[in-house]
Image: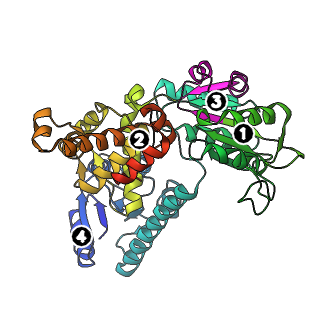
Amino acid sequence: MANILIADDEKAIRKTLREILEFEGYNVSEAEDGAKALSMIHENDYDLVLCDIKMPKVDGMEVLTRAMVDSPDTPFIMISGHGTVENAVEATKKGAFDFISKPPDLNRLLITIRNGLDKANLMIETKVLKRKVGKTREIIGDSPAIKKIKDTIDRVAPSEARVLITGDNGTGKELVSRWIHEKSNRSNATLVEVNCAAMPGELIESELFGHEKGAFTSAIKTRIGKFEQAHGGTLFLDEIGDMSLAAQAKVLRALQEGKITRVGGDKDISVDVRVVAATNKDLLSEVEAGRFRLDLYHRLGVIIIHVPSLNERRDDVPLLAERFAKEICEDYGIPKKMLTPKAMEELKLMNWTGNIRELHNVMERLVILSGSKITEDEVRTYVTNTQAKDTPTDLFENFDKFQDFKEHIEKLFIEHKLKKFGWNVSKTAEVLDIQRSHLYNKIEKYDLKRAN
């Protein structure tokens, strides 16, 4: 049931309103002055606030103004024994849901409360839906590195310059690409995304450039490639360091001449595309190893934006953790859960090998398993301790047969490497120096699954 705060300096009014609202099934809290009300709003998550205008210490209008900063979606119903049209208009301008004169009419009060709660629920549902279908999420952070990235996006986006985004898996390279598109002159056109690491080398050319009917056995009809789909817009090539040399040559031609040729075709097709690429690899090292074209590197890297790991910007962890906790609570339809200062410090000390993606998963775990507040004990219980490694003695005692022990270690090792490289099977197989088909067999054998 909804949590409602009554802020009024008249004890009799508070008592009457509490009895009425508790009879209706609401959970009710009380504040005898404006200062107390602000403190309670800051520390707790209320679904609705009934607030008197004339109160000691801090008046109701000031409470409304300051509360709207921290809790803009909380419905405020202002009540006053000296109600005027001017007061009602002022309260509405400051964000109040409604204004009621004292003594309040019981039926009107209950209807207004119900309508206020319904509106708040609709606003939360709308935010959740917009976040799920929206193009972009906010880039969160106040660290110098994030401020520099935001400034670079503002400068680069309106131009036609190609951008290369570098950084580890899970740092938010895709989000940077989306903001470049959103702030560009092409924002009304399409942003087309291609994960170059997620498809076999023999299919990447067909994916990018399309193919003609009959170009190969399964080409039963003509297919439009990503370059053509992105005509007039932006093409985001994620993990471009995993692209085959043959595909790199065709991408280079498309960038140089603004033309492509479908697989199995002989007709040049003009395309007007802005390319933004991203990679978790050191492309210059890849060039030296003969796996990436130097001329393509220079074509892509007109502007280079490096996205730092979360360990490099630990001061942003509290901002990210609070935002994720709020969004996850909204997604699950549960009251907002606050993190204590010590819990924040515990999170800042963690080793974030999975970066932003790992932090989001951790916050989802804490929101589900924690109480009304997320404390440092819960962080240690549900996060820190789960990452602690077994001592060799403990590990050895769990196995009698050498084969069982060897398979256990192999499973943990492969799972760790897959997570490290964002479940990029090609990259993981390359690092492990085994055939990709062999790695797939191991994944199937140990029933390894990627966490959502």
The structure residue drawn at horizontal position 56% and vertical position 25%, both measured from the top left corner, is: 148
Residue 287 is inside the magenta segment: yes
Q: Which residue is at the far top?
A: 288
Q: Amino acid at mark 3?
A: Leu
**Tag 2: Cα neighbours inside 10 Å, few (<14), some, or many (≥20)?**
many
- Nearer to us of marks 4 and 2 is 2
Residue on which disc 3 sits: 164
Q: Earlier in the sequence, mark 2 or mark 3?
A: 3
Query: What number is the disc on residue 18?
Result: 4
Q: Whole-percent x and y of residue 305?
A: 59, 27
Q: Earlier in the sequence, mark 3 or mark 4?
A: 4
Q: Earlier in the sequence, mark 2 or mark 1?
A: 1
Residue on which disc 2 sits: 418
Cβ–Cβ under 8 Å for marks 2 and 1? no
What kind of element bears circle 2? helix
Residue on which disc 1 sits: 184
Cβ–Cβ under 8 Å for marks 4 and 2? no
Residue interval drawn in magenta: 277-306
